[in-house]
Image (cartoon, helix red, strand yellow):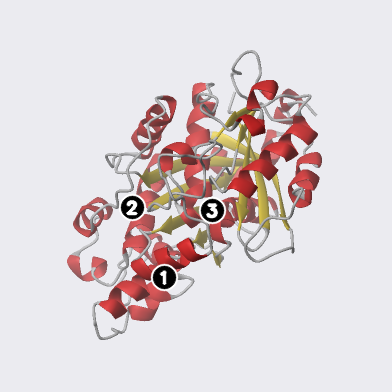
Amino acid sequence: MEYAQLLRKKDSFVQVSGASLVVGGLPIGTGALMRAQAWESLCKGKQLPAIQPGRDQLAEITTLNVSDSSVLGIHQLMAIAVTEFAWKEAGLDGSRLRIRGVDAGLRHARYGCISGTSLGGMTAFELEITAGKRPSPYSLSRWRGNSVGAAVSKRFGLGGGDYSLNSASATGAQCLYLGATLIQAGLCDLMVVVAADAQATPEISRAMQRNGSVSSDFTQGPLSSGRSGMNPVPGAACLILESAEHLAARGGRALANWLGGECANEAYHMLAPEPGGQALRSLLKNQTIQPDWISLHATGTTSFDAIEIAAIRDVLNQKRPWLTAIKSMTGHALGASGLIEAAIVVEGLQRASVPPWPSDTDPLLDLKSIKPAVAPQPETALLIGQGMGGNVVLNMLGAVR
């Protein structure tokens, strides 16, 4: 089915009405500004530094008082910050609830939250334990698996379903898939989809090095000949998803359409992808729309990169979609990476443009043989997310025309 045909059924779409990200020390501003800054860096081929925003800066952005911000971990503060900007871009109301203590303010009964973090709670735990701090009544709220969802839902009065995910590097992609699917099922009118991860702490960094996932040379990015693993960085992103009916009824504006997705598990190995990438190949074959643009997962891990390219070459070579490796610019923001990439793809669909084709790539991948002759003005983009533990997720986004 062509995208033009699908547009005639737009009332069934899930639509993106706000999108924001924090990554790589980019100046923090509105959702549109941060997307534009990330886009410009990507188009220049600029690798961003692994800079984590400061607590005071995030507290100011979120307008949290000292009492509220003091009980939150840095990953929670980043999550609230990106939600604040995405919420405002979507044109949603300005009411906010306190984090600490009891607040009987307005609850949005049909607004839910899908949140994720890969290691945010663990980083908060390690920082506090190694500092010799005595656990506070709010310590578990920073360490728990639902640390992001609980804080965001409390702050924005999200009274609908609140779901917390951890699918390693596939977390953000899985959040997007599940949030859109719940709206399609009619269970919510609006979902805040948000993920955040802080800078890896010393013990977590050592564990990453032990499992071989971290690069020995951060100048060698994804798909390059010298790649040896990922470059872990802090980051966060948020997308506001709404049913087309709800968005139209409140007079909102769509930035992009979520057209569908797929989710599977390789069930092969706790650390390594299945040779041949059969789960990814199967999901790619299920796509009814052949994308103009594919945002690769492309972590820089040798086996993951090779399997991903081989699957695309086998399944989608006739279409020859445009390929991008966004982590070459942002680094790998762990659980937040899939949503950071989604926010950047939203920017590209709005601009009807794509970032540059990956450069300095491994000759063994032979990307030149599948490069389109001309860069497209994309109408559809497919985002690939994968994670240790076998999770494989696809999300298809479409331009608003």
Between the C-alphas of marks 1 and 3, the distance is 16 Å
Left or right of residue 18: residue 262: right
Say above or below: 240 vs 210: above
Q: Which residue is mark 2?
A: 81
Between the C-alphas of marks 1 and 2, the distance is 17 Å
Q: Residue at x 74, y 63 (%)?
A: 268
Query: What secondary structure is found at the residue carrying circle 3?
Result: helix
Q: Which of the marked residues, 1 or 3, is nearer the chain's N terminus?
A: 1
Q: Nearer the viewer, residue 309 or 247?
A: 309
Question: Which amino acid type corresponds to the residue marked 3 in the rendered image?
Answer: Gly
Would residue 310 be visible to someone looking at this image? yes
Q: Position of residue 371 (x, y in %)?
A: 65, 21
Q: Position of residue 381 (x, y in %)?
A: 62, 33
Q: Position of residue 117 (x, y in %)?
A: 47, 62
Circle on res. 121: 1
Query: What secondary structure is found at the residue carrying circle 2?
Result: helix
Quadrant for the C terminus in the image: top right
Q: Position of residue 287 (x, y in %)?
A: 77, 39
Disc 3 and disc 2 in contact, CB within 8 angstroms: no
Quadrant for the N terminus in the image: top right
Q: Which of the marked residues, 1 or 2, is nearer the chain's N terminus?
A: 2
Identify the image quadrant of residue 71: bottom left
Say above or below: 355 vs 223: above
Left or right of residue 171: residue 233: left
Q: Name the mark nearer the viewer: 3 or 2.
A: 3
Query: What secondary structure is found at the residue carrying circle 1?
Result: helix
Q: Residue at x 20, y 63 (%)?
A: 65
Circle on res. 321: none
Q: Which residue is mark 3?
A: 172
Question: Which amino acid type corresponds to the residue marked 1 in the rendered image?
Answer: Gly
Q: Nearer the viewer, residue 96 or 22?
A: 22
Question: Which amino acid type corresponds to the residue marked 2 in the rendered image?
Answer: Ala
